[in-house]
Image (cartoon, rainbow, N blue to C red):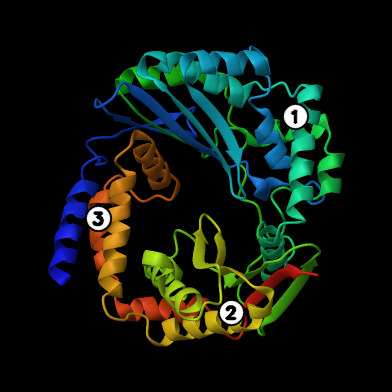
């Protein structure tokens, strides 16, 4: 088994080293404050862009939650040159896609098309990001969709448990304390002027990154980007928003929500975790794998679900971005098994803290992390996303060359230390949404 793991690991490491190296990527500034990375790929006649802007829910003013999400949803709903219908018909006729999506920390955008249509799609992308018109009729359509989603979430045990967990685990004013979607009343009160102002202020090139992969020449792509984004004006320097510190509490917090008409209970148990740039990132991610993601969902799946039959599903998930996101265990259970399931989850966390590695878990976790990255890099979209993450987190264009060594250097002692540092059994939060 060890020999098989070694062969798989060696093969994965070789694959990882191929797509992105300092020599293979052209990195240039755009509008002086943004960055473009281009990786020429001659395998298929395709063109892919992945990009990121610092215009996510973290920028929502208090009382205007949902503003970032609504703004992003409207960028493809009408611009100075395109109506919503014309934009959709043009993309459809080309077999292309163009999307913009907000999350808590930022806004992701992307393009996929044939390489022969790259110039047109870059022009369309710039048009969408720089010149949206926020037509009133489209605002009302998107507002109605967002409010409908908020109402539906009130009757979803997973969504209710997640919202209750974040509200209790993170302090007021923290981006993970509140909902990206906002509340029904905050979304209903958003005006067109608020959307226009949010776009004017935050949809700027400052700190933005674009990763381009395709059957194109880097110099031609860079020249086209300079032309397409010539009107994209940088904003005055502005520091990151103030975010209150988040850490496990001094005692266990319990939140329970009741939803009439349901038959399943959902549990979210966890703590504020770690950021992508934390020194604990690799050991903590391996701890998360071993706890509840590896194979059929790690130790949690093997015991709480399979051996004890206490959960329909159970897994762990650490969200590590620019901010330290939640590190949670999530489970769906029969309402009568809630307390036993919570006890089982706590027992497995304690086991990880005391015995971080058993049997072949360390090699399995290492091979999974190295091999799964190799799989991601088999597509242009995966390469573009990897380039984007490398740029956003300052990892360096030699990162993929170093990555297997970083993973294989993680020790059981480091995994245990990360589990004990973050997965506090004295100050975790558990939220349960169950039938009334």
Frontmost residue, 85 versus 82? 85
Residue 162, compared with residue 241, is above or below; it is below
Q: Residues within 10 Å of mark 2 (few under 14, many from 20)?
A: many
Label count reads 3
Q: Residues within 10 Å of mark 1 (few under 14, many from 20)?
A: some
Residue 406 position within the rendered picture, expressed as x and y whole percent measured from the top left: 28, 62
Tell me where residue 371 sits by quadrant. bottom left
Real-space Cα distance between discs 3 and 2?
Answer: 40 Å
Residue 364 position within the rendered picture, expressed as x and y whole percent measured from the top left: 28, 68
**Residue at image point 37% right, 76% down:** 415
- Looking at the rendered structure, the secondary structure element under dot 1 is helix
Tell me where residue 243 sits by quadrant. bottom right
Residue 57, compared with residue 35, is above or below; it is below
Q: Classify residue 203 as left or right of residue 193.
A: left
**Residue at image point 63% right, 79% down:** 337
- Looking at the rendered structure, the secondary structure element under dot 2 is helix
Marks 2, 1: nearer the viewer: 2
Q: Which residue is mark 1?
A: 196
């Amino acid at each position: 088994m060890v020999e098989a793991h070694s062969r798989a690991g060696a093969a994965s490491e070789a694959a990882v080293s191929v797509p992105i190296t300092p020599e293979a990527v052209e990195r240039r500034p755009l509008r002086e404050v943004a960055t473009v990375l281009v990786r020429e790929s001659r395998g298929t006649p395709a063109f892919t862009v992945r990009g990121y802007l610092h215009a996510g829910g973290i920028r929502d003013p208090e009382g205007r939650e949902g503003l970032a999400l609504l703004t992003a949803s409207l960028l493809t709903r009408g611009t100075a040159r395109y109506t919503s219908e014309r934009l959709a018909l043009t993309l459809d006729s080309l077999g292309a896609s163009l999307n913009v999506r907000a999350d808590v920390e930022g806004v992701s955008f992307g393009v996929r098309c044939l390489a022969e249509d790259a110039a047109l799609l870059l022009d369309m992308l710039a048009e969408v990001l720089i010149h949206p018109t926020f037509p009133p009729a489209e605002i009302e359509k998107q507002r109605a969709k967002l409010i409908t989603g908020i109402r539906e979430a009130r009757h979803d045990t997973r969504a209710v448990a997640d919202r209750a967990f974040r509200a209790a685990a993170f302090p007021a004013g923290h981006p993970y304390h509140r909902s990206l979607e906002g509340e029904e009343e905050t979304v209903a009160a958003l005006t067109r002027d608020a959307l226009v102002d949010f776009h004017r202020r935050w949809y700027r090139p400052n700190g933005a990154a674009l990763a381009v992969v395709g059957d194109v020449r880097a110099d031609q792509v860079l020249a086209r980007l300079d032309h397409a984004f010539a009107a994209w004006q940088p904003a005055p320097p502005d520091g990151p928003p103030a975010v209150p510190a988040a850490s496990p509490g001094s005692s266990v917090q319990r939140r329970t929500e009741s939803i009439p008409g349901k038959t399943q209970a959902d549990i979210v148990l966890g703590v504020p975790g770690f950021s992508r740039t934390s020194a604990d990132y690799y050991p903590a991610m391996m701890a998360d794998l071993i706890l509840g993601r590896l194979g059929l969902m790690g130790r949690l799946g093997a015991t709480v679900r399979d051996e004890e039959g206490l959960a329909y599903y159970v897994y762990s998930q650490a969200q590590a971005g620019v901010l330290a996101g939640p590190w949670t265990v999530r489970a769906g259970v029969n309402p009568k098994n809630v307390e036993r399931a919570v006890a089982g989850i706590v027992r497995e966390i304690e086991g990880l803290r005391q015995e971080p590695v058993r049997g072949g878990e360390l090699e399995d976790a290492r091979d999974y992390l190295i091999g799964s990255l190799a799989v991601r890099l088999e597509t242009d979209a995966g390469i573009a996303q990897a380039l984007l993450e490398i740029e956003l987190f300052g990892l360096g264009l030699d990162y993929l060359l170093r990555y297997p060594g970083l993973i294989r250097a993680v020790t059981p002692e480091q995994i245990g230390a990360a589990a004990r540092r973050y997965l506090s059994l004295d100050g975790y939060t558990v939220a349960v949404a169950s039938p009334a």
